[in-house]
Amino acid sequence: NAGVTQTPKFRILKIGQSMTLQCTQDMNHNYMYWYRQDPGMGLKLIYYSVGAGITDKGEVPNGYNVSRSTTEDFPLRLELAAPSQTSVYFCASSYPPTSGTYTDTQYFGPGTRLTVL
Amino acid sequence: DAKTTQPPSMDCAEGRAANLPCNHSTISGNEYVYWYRQIHSQGPQYIIHGLKNNETNEMASLIITEDRKSSTLILPHATLRDTAVYYCIVRPYFSGGGADGLTFGKGTHLIIQP
């Protein structure tokens, strides 16, 4: 298994441009997540999805959009890029809770380093 | 408000046990303690989690105090590759489905010295 893969690894955008960060997992996980990590800080949740066709906002969703048409893929769309979106973006996935308890373990991709100038 | 408190940095000699403390004095009865680590420039990696009993796996041991207000992650024989930022996270459990993200603080930067 490749696990969670993300593309591209690096990207420089100009203010106002748009792009899509790709995330794919081959573990058949229902749950997928997008986080961002600013320099010297912990991760913050942008969006998450509990299955194909279902997405919801996290802590910092403004300026981003997501879709989930398949179990494997969870792309993150940046519209009208701003310097405040300069960050490292991590995608993660996990199995849903089982046996009545919430004990998911999240598996992370290698990240996409985005700079907006 | 931060749910966990960790020292910002720690040193440990290679080959020795690294003991990373975490305070979570406001932990609820339905919250697990999770540990993740992040090696420089990589995505976070799951290490271990527990509710109230001590836990051990191939990577580490987790010791949770009886009152559950603090815990210690133990890396038994630290190597240079264990140099990373270690995050202690409390996370509720519940039945019925749904999801939410992990809440990462600033963690402890563990430096393994040769």
Image (spheres, coloured by chain):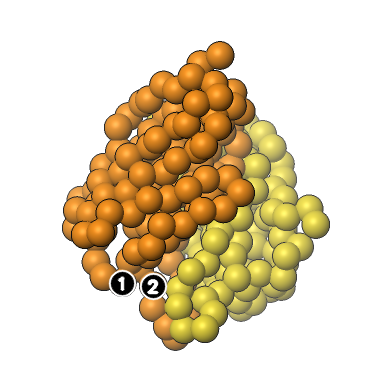
Chain colours: A yellow, B orange
Residue at x 55%, y 32% (from the top left corner): B77
In the rendered image, residue B95, in percent from the top left (x then y), is placed at 42, 83
Towards the viewer: B36 or A72? B36
Give the left or right position of residue A72, taking residue B66 as reference: right
Q: Amino acid at mark 2?
A: Tyr
Quarter assignment of residue A38: top left
Residue at x 36%, y 26% (from the top left corner): B9
**SS at badge 2:** loop
Same chain for the residues at labels 1 and 2, yes or no?
Answer: yes
Local crowd at mark 2 within 10 Å, few (<14), some, or many (≥20)?
A: some
Towards the viewer: A13 or B6? B6
Q: Cβ–Cβ below 8 Å for labels 1 and 2?
A: yes
Q: Quadrant of the C terminus of chain B?
A: top right
Give the distance between the C-alpha atoms of the residues marked 1 and 2, in whole angstroms: 6 Å
Quarter assignment of residue B18: top left
Give the left or right position of residue A26, taking residue B18 as reference: right
Residue at x 44%, y 28% (from the top left corner): B110
Label 2, on which residue?
B93
Q: Is residue A34 above or below residue B6?
A: below
In the rendered image, residue B36, in percent from the top left (x then y), is placed at 49, 47
Towards the viewer: B81 or A18? B81
